[in-house]
Every structure is written in C-alpha cells, then in structure tokens.
Image (cartoon, rainbow, N blue to C red):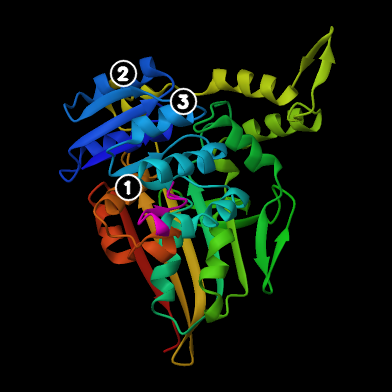
Amino acid sequence: MRIVVLGGAGKMGSIAVSALNKEDRVDEIVIADFNTQAAQEVADYIGSPKISVEYADVNDHEGLVEVLQGADACLNATVYYTNLQVMEACLESGVHYTDLGGLFHTTLKQLELSDRFAERGLSAVLGMGSAPGIPNIQARYAADRLDTMEYIHIYDGIKPPPPDDLRFTYAVPTILDEMNLPPMVYRDGEFVAVEPLTGFEDYQFTPPLGILPMHYSLHSEVATLPRTFKDKGVRECFFKINYWGMAKETVEKVRVLGEFGFNSTEPVDVKGTQVVPREVLVAMMKKFVPSVLEFLAPPKNQPPNWVKEIVTEVKGTKDGKEVIYRLGTLTVKGALPTGTAPALAAIWLAEGRVPAGVHPPEAALDPVPFFKDLEKHGIVTRVTVTEPV
C-alpha cells in the first residue's frame, strides 16, 4: 500500500506520516512537499525505510499528477484552499483522496465532484482532520441507534496554553479564517451565519480538561451532518471550540490586528508599492509557528503537552423515548488526532472500504471499527447514553 501525504512536512502532515509508519498495512509513504528540506528532516527523524521524499507543488498540475501516479491514496495535509485542485489531480491520476477539512464552504464545492469520482471508480472522504472527521463519525454512531434526531452539538476542547504562549499550532491562513469568517450554524432547519467568538457556554469535559469556555467557529461538520441526517429530523447543529486551542490573549491580539485591517486582502499603497495586508500578517505570524520537530520530538523525549477531547452530543428518540448520546474522543500522552484520523481514512480508502464518490465522513466510515483503529494510536472514544428509566 502506497500513500502520498501532500504537505507531509507540515505540522499535521508530519503527524500523519508518523501514524502511517506505525501501520503494518502501509508499505510505502511518500512525503510530497514544496519544502523538501523540511520533508527530509521529518523522514530522517522517523527513520523508516518505508518513507521517501518527493518535491510537489500544488500549483503545478502536471507535476502533481506525476507524483500521485501509482499511489493507493492521497492524504492532502495542505491548507484547505488547495482541496479542489488536489482533487482534480487525483481524478487525473486515478488516486483516492482525503483531507483535513474544507471550512464549510469549500467542503460544499468538493461534494459537487462526487459524480466525477464515481465515474472513475474513485473514492474521497472529506474533512478527516480530527475535527472535522471524528465528530461526524460520532454523530453517525448515534444516528445508527436513533429513530429521530433533534440536535447535534459538537464541542472541541483543547488544553489551554499559558497566557504568554503566542504560538500557532496549525496553518496560519486557516486560523485567520476561523477567527474572522462568520460561523455557520443550523437552526430550525436553516443554515444561519453568526458572529465569530459568540455563543459562549461553559462545557464540562473529561478530566484533566474540566470546564472550558466554548464558542462558535466555522467548521465543515455543520455543512454536512444536517443534510446527511435530514430524514431523521435534525433541527439544530453547531460546532464550538475554546479559542482554537490557543491562549485567549493570543486570539485577542490577532483579532485587534484584524480590526485595524491587517487581515484585508485589498492591496494598499506603501511608498509606491502595492502591499496586501493579510500576506504581511501571515508572514509575521509564521514566526510564531513551532517547528515540526517540536511535535514529533518534544524536549527530553517527553510526549507533547497535549490533551484534547472531541465531544458530540446528539438528542433524539428511540422507540418513542427521549435519548441523549454523548460521545467523547479523548487524546492524552501525546496522541495527536489531527494527523492520525486522516491517516486511517487514507488506509481505509486504499483498502477499498469506501464506496466510489465523494463523501463526508459520516456517510463513508463505519464508527465502531474506526474508533477501534483510533484506539490503537492512543485515541479513545467513550459513549454515555442518557434515557428515561
């Protein structure tokens, strides 16, 4: 089995490479990246004969098609802006596809490629970057056991860093979009745009996380779950997170810069030169992004100081009785689901376990065996059912 990890030298891509390397089912892993030096550093650290490095530029269609030739699946770990063009390359090269998410709007455009993938006998699973991805499968678990569904509430709880920690732990452009684009929620059968950093509520997570302040964020789960389970009567769906896993103080600083126009894509004249403020902001923020090896090789050989629980609560009915499912997927001791979940999805695609076409996770992946695969990587899911006596 040959898996190409596009953007495998990045934060989440390198975690995916590491997860794939632990799987006996995978024979060959290609780190395909624009930055071959960083890709080689990842390969050297993991030190596996299964791993090779190839240059890849998502803007070079022909070159990307050539890199993908002969692969059983492509795991796209680049920024979500590239999803559609990478899918086009997969269609041409005849390769199955998965990614980390499309931030709602891009996901809807990707789903429109389903007929073309099916015609080629190819499969794609969208939004497998832990969240989206794991919440979709959690909701599917509940849906399979309910006659009707009233709401799907998703909470992504991450251990907060210290207030003076200014680091950004994933793609800076995605962080900026999540902070500034209106979140979409599903209310009373309609999609509604709301303001970023609103809808705050305190939510109780499994220890050691405890109570965390949660707010709305734009996410792909909300784009697909109400549609997938429309026949069960879903009336509400939202996604909430605690400051995107960053310090509240860091988020406030970036938000202020946005208010002053630094997130604008409109060029401004600076001493006769046209400058795009957002491009400057992204370049400056990248200075606060940890190196890949800080994720793969923490100081003193200790696991990353990382705790995360993804929770999906689903209220519905079974045999006329009200039932609430709570599924919590907890990661401790260094397990990093954002790279592991898409790695497993890529394996399932390569094994032919996903039907042809383009699918959201809840329509493509069987929950129980997928949760068992995650558990082998230290990512454990627990289910609580609340119902009348």
Instruction: Give the number of the mark in front: 1 or 3.
Output: 3
Secondary element at image label 2:
helix
Quarter occupied by the C terminus: bottom left
At a point 36% along the width and 54% down the height, the residue shown is 122
User: Which quadrant would residue 172 be assigned to in this image?
Assistant: top right
Q: Name the residue under label 1.
A: 346
Q: Earlier in the sequence, mark 3 or mark 2?
A: 2
Q: Quick check: can you spot residue 6?
A: no
Secondary element at image label 1:
helix
Vertical side of 33 occupied by 129: above or below:
below
Q: What stretch is highlighted in magenta?
A: 118-130
Q: Which of marks 1 and 3 is nearer the N terminus?
A: 3
Residue 272 forms part of the magenta stretch: no
In the image: residue 25, left or right of residue 255: left
Q: Mark 3 points at which residue?
A: 57
Mark 1: which amino acid?
A: Ala
Q: Name the residue under label 2.
A: 40
